[in-house]
Image (spheres, helix red, strand yellow):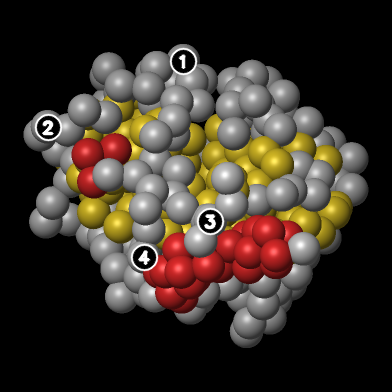
Amino acid sequence: MKEHPTQKHILLVAACLGLSAGAAAADCVQITEGLVVESPVWSPDGTTLAFHSGIDIYTVPATGGPVTHVIENAQWPTWSPDGTRLAFARAFPPGVWDIWVLELSTGALQQITTSPRYDTHPDWSHDGDKIVYKASRIDHDALYVYSFSTGLHTRLTSYTGESPDWAPNDERIVFERHSFPEGPDIMLVDYPSGDEQRIFWSGSGYYWPRWHPSGESLILIGLDDIALNPCVVSYPLPSGPRLDLRCRSPWVGLSYPEWAPDGSRYSVVEAGDLTICDQATAVQSETWGTVKSRYRSDRE
């Protein structure tokens, strides 16, 4: 049965105002308060998240609960596939950032890089042998890969790269390339060939891409076409169509989306607080673009 024109008008007005008939508040649960959370990552078993706040790393249960301080002067944590270690960028001494690994059961530390400048944004491969990281050198910035088995550091990208994330099969890495003031390009690079592919141009409004556990789509932050509200977006590769999972007003803000290991939930930072959302029920109502498209097709 077709909608009455008045119903269509109400729906269009709601879309223009950024209102949503989608997920109820209970579908997303805030699990931290009082800390400005950055770069949260799920443990491989899905029970815990690690994150940094300021220049300290913490962990918190995925169900909520006490926050545990892990290490100071450190940022950008990433879990080993077996969940026993964390790699991160650490300023030790202060002002010189290198990649370190912490054995969680013993507190033992291993320094991976010894750059006189900045090595940051590590991500651990799923086979456990490699860490990709952003390297700042005197003559260039690029993504490098460290192999535990060989002890070698290999340059992977031709230009700078940030926020890298290994695909589940370890054959590709998605990352941001910050080369324009309009925002980052979203890039893919094949491993180990180094062949690069641009997914989104700078200015598209997308950032912080992360893989779905299936390896068939990305979760990232994008802008809707209502009023440039930030949204958590699922984007199937190679060419969409995108699905907005959660949209918020610009003054609330969204950042750092990440799928749980089983793909049933995702985490996102809202106004500095870590929030866990149920993927099955937290899909928001249509974007303005899809509403316009459906409205036009209904009239034909």
Element at badge 4?
Answer: loop
On residue 264, the disc is none
Residue at label 4? 19
Q: Which residue is mark 1?
A: 82
Q: Which residue is mark 2?
A: 65
Q: Position of residue 271 (x, y in %)?
A: 27, 63
Whether residue 262 is visible to the viewer of this picture, yes or no, is yes
**Disc 1 on helix, strand or loop?**
loop
Instruction: Give the Cα distance between marks 4 and 3.
Output: 19 Å
SS of the residue under disc 2: loop
Is 200 situated left or right of 269 in this image? Answer: right
Q: If the image is split into quadrants, where does the C terminus sit?
A: bottom right
- Distance in Å between CA atoms under marks 1 and 3: 53 Å
Quarter of image, res 212? top right
Q: Is residue 248 left or right of 180 when viewed as pictured?
A: left
The percent coordinates of residue 197 (x first, y second) are 85, 54
Query: Which sits earlier in the primary sequence, circle 1 or circle 4?
Result: 4
What amino acid is labelled 3 in the image? Glu
Distance from disc 1 to disc 4, alpha carbons, whole Å, reads 42 Å
Residue closest to the eye, 25 or 67: 25
Which badge, 2 or 1, is on the more N-terminal residue? 2
Res. 3 mark:
3
